[in-house]
Image (cartoon, rainbow, N blue to C red):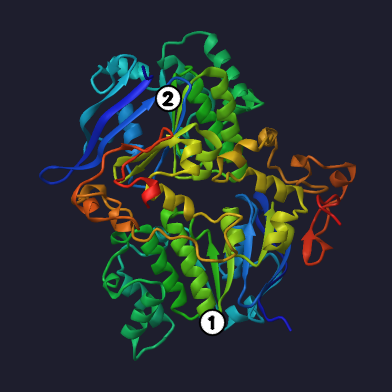
Amino acid sequence: MVEVAVEVRNVSKVYGGRTARVVQALSDVSLTLERATTFGIVGESGCGKSTLARLLVGLEAPTSGELFVEGTSIDATKRSGTESLARKIQLVFQDPFSSLDPRMTVEKTLREVLRVHSLHPDNVQGRIAELLAMVGLSGRFANRYPHELSGGQAQRVAVARALAVEPQILVLDEPTSALDVSVRAEIINLLVRIQQELGLSYVFISHDLSMVRHVSDVIAVMYLGRVVELGRYDAVFDETLHPYTKALGDAVVVPDPVRERAKNLSLSDAVSISVAPVVQGCPYAPRCGFAQEQCRDVAPQLEQKRDAHFASCFFPLSST
Amino acid sequence: MSLLSIQDLHIGIARKHDNDEIVRGVSIEVEPGEKLGIVGESGSGKTLTMLAVLRLLASPPLSVLSGRVIFADEDLLEVNEKRLRQVRGGEIAMVYQDPMSSLNPLLRVGSQLEETLKSHGARGPEVAGRVHDVLLQVGLTEPERVTSSYPHQLSGGMVQRVMIAMALLTSPKVLIADEPTTALDVTIQRQILELVTSLQAATDMAVLWVTHDLGVVASLVDSVVVMYAGRVVEKASTTALFVRPTHPYTKALLASLPTLESGHRSPLHQIGGTPPDPARLGAGCPFRARCPYAFDKCALEEPPLLERGEGSFAACWKEPEQW
C-alpha cells in the first residue's frame, strides 16, 4: 500500500466577498503526496501555489474541501492545538532574511523553537549543535545574527529551524529564488541529502522549472487556481499534454544560446488578455492556441490521459 | 570609436575614516547597436557601475573615486548638471528591476510618460501622440486605457512595458536595463525579451542588460561581461562564453545549473564558499578561495584581464586548457 504523507481533497479557497472583489485562489484541487517523495508545484504568480502552501501548514483554512497530513485532517489536528500540526509539517519561506528574526542569534532562534515545543529540555545545546551540523554549519555560527550571514547560510538556518521540531513534511516555497545563483546548487543538494537521511516528504513550490524537474518525483502544473496537468517529473515535460505546460516550458530561458536562438515564439499577444475570471469554459482557452468551440463552452476536468499522467484538456498535445 | 566607454572606474563607500573600494577598475566598451550582458551576483558591483554611468550613485556614502565615462566625446562624470539632465533619460535611458517602485503611485501613467518627454523639451500636441505611439510599440494595445490608469491598476508585465516605453520615448542611443525581468513570471519575461530584441533591431540602440540569469544572457545578448568582487573577470561573445568559458567562476556558474542532461536528483555542482566582500579583499585573486585550479601565484597577485583566444578575455592566470 502506498503511504500517504499529504492528501488535498477537493480544496477550494475564495478570498473577498460581500463588498470586496471575489478571488477564487483555488478551485477544487486534489493532490496526493506519497511519503518520502517530492511533489513539485509550478505555475505563474496568481496560480494559487502559495495559497496551497499556506493551507497545508494551517495558516489559513480552505473555503471547502479537506486537507490531511499523515492521515489526520488538518482541521482535527488544529483543534488539539496548532503545535501538533506544526510538529508534522513545516514551511520554509523564500527569503530567509525576512523569515528570520533580525534580533535573534541563530542559537536563540533554534532555542525558541525547542522551548515552545518542549523538545530536548535536558539537552538543548546538544540538539542545536546537531541541527547546525545537519545543515552543514559549524558551531561558530550559533552566535551570529541574520545580518552576519550570507544568503545561503541564512537559508540553511531557516531549514534547521524547520527541522528542529522533527517534522515529517517540509513545504518549500521557492527556497532558492532569493539566493545568488552560485549558492542555489548547494541548498538544493542539502535539501536532497536531508530528505534521504531523514525520509522526509517535500512539497516543492517554484517557478524555476529546471529546478523543480531536478528534485521532484511528481509535478503538478497550476493555472488560475486549478491543476491543469499532473504526472511524473519527466512525463510532464517530455510528453507534455496541456498546452499551458507547453507554453510555460517554452517561455523558460535556458542557458544555451543555440537552443535559445532556435526558438521562435510568439507569446506577445498574451499581454492583452484580461485577468477577469473566466465564467464559462476552460480558464486557459483565451490564451490557448488550440482552443476550439467546446473549450469556450465547457470546462475540462482533470482526467487520466495516460498511465499516471493527468491533464484537464479536451485536446491534449501528445495523446496516445 | 565606442558609443559608450567606461574607463577604469573605481567606486568607494565611505567608512569612518576613509573609503572602501567596492568597484575596482571596471572598463566596459559598448558599440552602437550592441547588446551587452553584464552578469554577476549581488555585491559584484554590476548595478553600481551602471548607476555611476548616469551619476545616480547615492552619495554619500557612495562615490566615484576615479575613472571616466566617455559618451559622445564627453566625460559624463565631468559634465554640468544641465547637460547631465539631457543625457539621463534622453540619450541614455535606464529601466530598473522593480517597475512598481519606479513609478509614482499617485499619478496616472499618462502624465508620468508625458512628463518625461516635456523634461526633454517636447511641447504641444506631439507629446500625447508620441506617448500613444510608443505604448503601441511596446505591445500595449490599448494606450488610452494605460495612460488613464494608475500604476496599481496594471499588471506587473504591463508596468514593465510602461517603463520600457518611458525609456524609449526619447529614442535613446543606449538603454541600460537592470534586471528588468527578475520580478516577472517566465512567460512575461519571455515577452519582454522578445520585445527588446525586436525594438533594438529596429532602432540600432545599444542595450546593456544587467542580469544574474545565464538563461537571459543566452537568449538576448551578443556579448557578455562577467563581474566578480567589483571587477570584470571575463569578457566574451555569448557563444564563446557558453562553449568555452575562460574564467573558473563562469565555468562553475554554468556547471551549477541543472540541465536536461544532469541526472535526476544527482548532486549539482557546488561552487562552495561565499562571494567575498569586495571591500575586504586581501592580496591575490578574490576567487581563489572558491577556485579548484588555484595555485601559489593566485594568492600573491591578482590577475589582470588576459587574452584567451576567440575574442575572450579572463582575469585568470591559467588558460582553460591548463585547468
Which quarter of the picture shows residue A118? bottom left
B316 shown above or below B9:
below
Q: Secondary structure at mark 2?
A: strand
B18 shown above or below B147:
below
B49 shown above or below A166:
above
Q: Is residue A57 left or right of residue A288?
A: left
Mark 1 nearby-residue class (10 Å; few <14, some 14–19, many ≥20)? some
Q: Is residue B277 left or right of residue A299?
A: left
Tell me which residue sits at (33%, 24%) in the image: B5
- Indicate the position of residue B163 as horizontal and vertical percent values: 50, 30
Tell me which residue sits at (63%, 28%) in the image: B140
Q: Look at the image and tell me whether residue B150 can be seen.
A: no
Q: Look at the image and tell me whether residue A98 can be seen.
A: yes
Q: Secondary structure at mark 1?
A: helix
Tell me which residue sits at (56%, 77%) in the image: A200
- Indicate the position of residue A116 as horizontal and vertical percent values: 41, 80
Q: Identify the residue position indicated by label 1 in the image.
A: A84
Dot 1 falls on which chain?
A: A
Q: Nearer the viewer, residue B312 or A295?
A: B312
B292 shown above or below B24:
below
